[in-house]
Image (tube, rainbow, N blue to C red):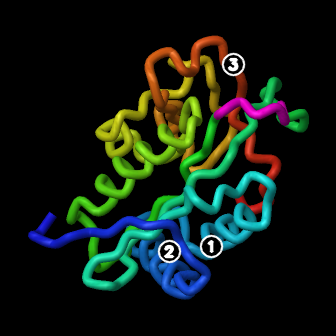
Amino acid sequence: MENAEITIRPEEHKDYKSIVSLILRSFQEGTDYSDGTDVIALVEEIRDSKYYIPELSFVAELDSKVVGHFLFSKFPLSPAREGGHHDETDSGIVMLAPVSVHADYFHRGIGTAMLNMGIEKVRQAGFKGITVEGNYNFYNKVGFRTSSEYNIFPTTGYPMKEPRCMMCQETYEGALDGIHGYIVYDMYFNA
């Protein structure tokens, strides 16, 4: 990163307006599959759900400006590909979604810095693993591997161009041993 100090801290209510703006620009200018409105709706849906973990929802600041946002939320695996019967016992797995970097700050290492710190916070909080869906070329660089390597299988999803887009990461060696299930987003309307 360009000789600047990035600060990563839990989001606060006062950040919400900045988060909305950066998500819109991040997805409008950085993807070919979303204008960001569905992502904002998903963030709000997660915040209103029983899966929300306030202390694992973060913003990144650079020169006192919010330049990134990402959150982890509890994610129950489905025992069936079709979903509908999520295992509501705590599997110890969190979902990383969404991840947004302000368009003015693309390609400066902010996303990598955010995730490295966030993954460590998830580990410290005692969770076993993290799921994420996205660009495997990026997420593989911060330790994610194809989820099926952990017996966690993709079902649907966008932009699920191929199974490598669904990834997991253990928080410690062997943490996901014995866990099996499917990623089904039917608890969220906007996923």
User: What is the distance, in whole Å, between disc 1 and disc 3 at their CAs?
Assistant: 30 Å
Q: Is residue 146 above or below residue 73?
A: above
Place residue 79 in its image quadrant: top right
The stretch drawn in magenta includes residue 176:
no
Which residue lies most toward the right here?
Answer: 85
The stretch drawn in magenta includes residue 89: yes
Residue 2 picture quarter: bottom left
Residue drawn 53% across and 71% down?
11
At x 57% / y 36%, what residue is drawn? 126
Q: Nearer the viewer, residue 106 or 115?
A: 115
Kindly identify the residue that appears in the image at 56 percent across and 86 percent down. 14
Q: Where does residue 110 sit, x and y in percent of width and height?
A: 29, 63
| Farthest-out residue, left | 3
Please give the count of numbered marks on the rendered protein.
3
User: For mark 1, what is the residue?
Assistant: 40
Q: Which residues are magenta?
A: 87-92
The image quadrant where one finds the C terminus is bottom right
Q: Main secondary structure of the magenta part?
A: loop
**Residue 107 point in image, percent of width and height:** 23, 63
Amino acid, disc 1:
Ile
Mark-to-mark CA distance, 3 and 2: 32 Å
Instruction: Name the residue rendered at 47%, 60% in the picture.
Output: 99
Category of crowding for the residue at label 1, using alpha-carbon neighbours closer than 10 angstroms: few (below 14), some (14–19), many (at least 20): some
Mark 1 in CB contact with mark 2 (< 8 angstroms): yes
Q: Which mark is residue 23?
A: 2
**Which circle's residue, 1 or 3, is located before the other in the chain?**
1
The residue to which callout 3 is attached is 180
Give the residue type that dot 2 points to.
Answer: Ile
Q: Describe the element under mark 2 as helix, strand or loop.
A: helix
Identify which amino acid the numbered label 3 is placed on: His
Is 122 left, or right, of 141 in this rendering?
right
